[in-house]
């Protein structure tokens, strides 16, 4: 009889210990995407801040020289050189072609106010780049603007640890996005949204006299058989900036903070109850 009581008591103690642990593990698993995405956002914002800080100390003559080199590069582009950024060939290697625009290895950053996206842009579309940030698609115009240019910026959709371009499929015509480089900020207004085959590059070719930028990612979510192209045409920066303020979401950080606070409260309650038992 005593053994049964002792056995029951041991079983109860195990249940008391295991239940909070299992609950805690479940909470951690549920919170992982949120916490991981927040961590990557912090890292991305640090990279953006680093780029802006480095830009301040570059002298104007050096910036002019770099921009002249970038314009010369754009003038020599061959449309036949464009490849799908998600092929194995494009995922390998380090891109050297955009050194003139680099500060701290970045050639700029892309901002989409409607979804609070602020991603560093690196040259090329290697796996290392696309796991953490946005890449410039080699073979398209460098992101410096100008007549008869069309730059393409690409990033992943649906990564478990970071959103990156996950939300751009929700963009609509009239939405704004910005590309920041060593010289200036370029504003673009969305005028075309297409889903194409991976080898269809006609929509991203340069059109004479136009200044375009396209955001590219895989679609549909989880299948990635096609490419989503969100194109914008260049608009005056100041007016676009004022309009973009109305598109900025206020709730992004609030959701994370409230979720984290609820998680902490639940853990405290569980620990108090477990201690009392």
Image (cartoon, rainbow, N blue to C red):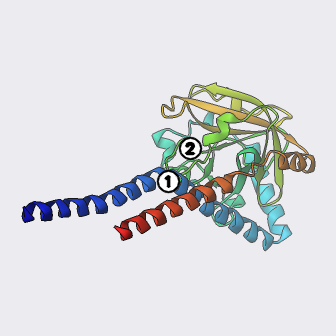
For disc 2, the neighbor class at 10 Å (few under 14, some 14 to 19, many from 20) is many
Where 38 falls versus 206 (above or below)?
below
Residue 208 falls in image quadrant: top right
The C terminus is located in which quarter?
Answer: bottom left
Residue indicated by mark 2: 156
Task: Say whether residue 39 is visible.
Answer: no
Residue at point 53% right, 34% down? 221
Between the residue at mark 1 and the residue at mark 2, the CA separation in whole angstroms equals: 21 Å
Where 144 falls versus 86 (above or below)?
below
Discs 1/2, front: 1
Q: What kind of element bears circle 2?
A: loop
233 displayed left or right of 50: right
Sequence-first disc among 1 and 2: 1
Residue 66 % position (x, y): 77, 61
Residue 176 % position (x, y): 80, 42
Residue 130 % position (x, y): 55, 49
Residue at point 38% right, 56% down? 25
Residue 261 falls in image quadrant: bottom right
Residue indicated by mark 1: 31
Residue at point 34% right, 55% down? 22
80 displayed left or right of 266: right
């Amino acid at each position: 009889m005593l053994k049964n009581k002792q056995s029951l008591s041991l079983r109860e103690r195990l249940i008391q210990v295991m239940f909070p642990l299992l609950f805690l593990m479940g909470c951690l698993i549920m919170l992982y995407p949120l916490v991981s995405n927040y961590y990557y956002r912090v890292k991305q914002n640090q990279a953006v801040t680093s780029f802006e800080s480095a830009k301040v100390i570059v002298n104007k003559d050096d910036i002019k020289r770099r921009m002249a080199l970038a314009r010369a590069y754009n003038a020599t582009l061959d449309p036949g050189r464009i490849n799908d950024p998600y092929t194995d060939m494009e995922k390998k290697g380090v891109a050297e072609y955009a050194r003139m625009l680099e500060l701290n290895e970045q050639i700029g950053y892309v901002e989409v106010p409607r979804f609070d996206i602020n991603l560093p842009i690196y040259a090329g579309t290697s796996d290392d780049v696309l796991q953490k940030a946005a890449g410039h698609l080699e073979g398209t115009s460098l992101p410096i603007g100008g007549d008869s240019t069309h730059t393409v910026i690409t990033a992943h959709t649906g990564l478990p640890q970071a959103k990156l371009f996950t939300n751009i499929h929700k963009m609509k015509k009239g939405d704004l996005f910005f590309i920041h480089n060593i010289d200036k900020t370029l504003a673009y207004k969305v005028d075309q949204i297409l889903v194409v085959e991976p080898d269809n590059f006609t929509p991203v070719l340069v059109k004479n006299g136009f200044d375009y930028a396209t955001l590219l990612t895989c679609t549909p979510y989880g299948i990635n058989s096609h490419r989503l192209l969100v194109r914008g045409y260049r608009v005056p920066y100041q007016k676009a900036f004022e309009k973009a303020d109305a598109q900025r979401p206020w709730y992004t950080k609030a959701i994370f903070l409230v979720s984290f606070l609820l998680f902490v409260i639940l853990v405290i309650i569980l620990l108090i109850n477990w201690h009392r038992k």
